[in-house]
Amino acid sequence: MTAHAVPHKVTHTKTLLGVFVLLAIMVSLVVASESLYRLFCQATGYGGTTQKAESSSEIILAREMTIRFNSDVDGALPWHFKPVQRSVTVKIGEEALIFYRTINNSTESITGTATFNVIPFKAAPYFNKIDCFCFTEQTLLPGEEVDMPVSFYIDPELVNDKHLEEVKEITLSYTFFKAEED
């Protein structure tokens, strides 16, 4: 019997080691999942994630696009947050600058962070933000009111995407949340 006991022990040890390695990989993926998902969305535009650009396009086309602006605030954040203008019409490739007005309605300083997306999702890879308040956390003093800028353009490559021929409007939407404390 001892001849058979050693192989079973080795087999069980290998199986147990394999399970622990698999468990370690799974835990690592869970820990990194938010960062990996964010990178995936930024690279592909998945879920309406816009692109970040260093500068505007050098090509401006005659085709126009209406950009609508939406805003929401999480209930835990006592801020008033609305676009200064509800929409703009821009030529594809043309840089635009718009503002969202934010007011801290509380009696304390609060830091907020904004998430964003573009609808229709399929237009997101062509929506390029040059500058945006959403790139950093925003701290507002009690009662403070600020206009937060968004500078963007629509990539001229959009016109080569047959899935976007019918798209005449894009909605840029933000939701502000209270920033997590360190």
Image (spheres, rainbow, N blue to C red):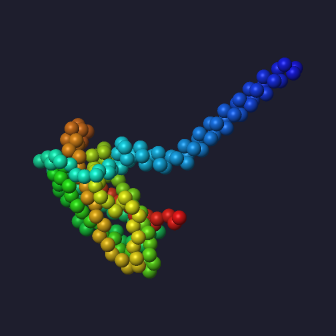
From this view, report whether residue 161 is shown above or below residue 92.
Answer: above
| Residue 168 visible in the snapshot | no
Give coordinates of residue 114: x percent, y percent: 39, 61
Q: Is residue 146 above or below residue 86?
A: below
Measuring from the top left, give residue 10's x and y in whole percent.
76, 26
> Residue 41: in sight, yes or no?
yes
Left or right for 27, reference 178: right
From the viewer's perspective, tell me whether residue 101 is left or right of residue 3.
left
Above or below 15: residue 73: below
Residue positioned 32% across, 72% down in the render? 146
Q: Quadrant of the N terminus?
A: top right
Residue at image point 43% right, 48% down = 38
Total marks drawn?
Answer: 0
Q: Is 125 positioned to the left or the right of 21 in the image?
A: left
Q: Residue at x 36, y 77 (%)?
A: 144
* The furthest residue to the left: 62
Q: Quadrant of residue 15?
A: top right
- The relative height of residue 55 versus residue 177 in the rendered view (above or below) is above
4 relative to 121 in the view: left or right:
right
Front position in the image: 90 or 73: 90
Q: Position of residue 75 (x, y in %)?
A: 44, 68
Q: Residue at x 28, y 55 (%)?
A: 130
The residue positioned farthest toward the front in the image shown: 54
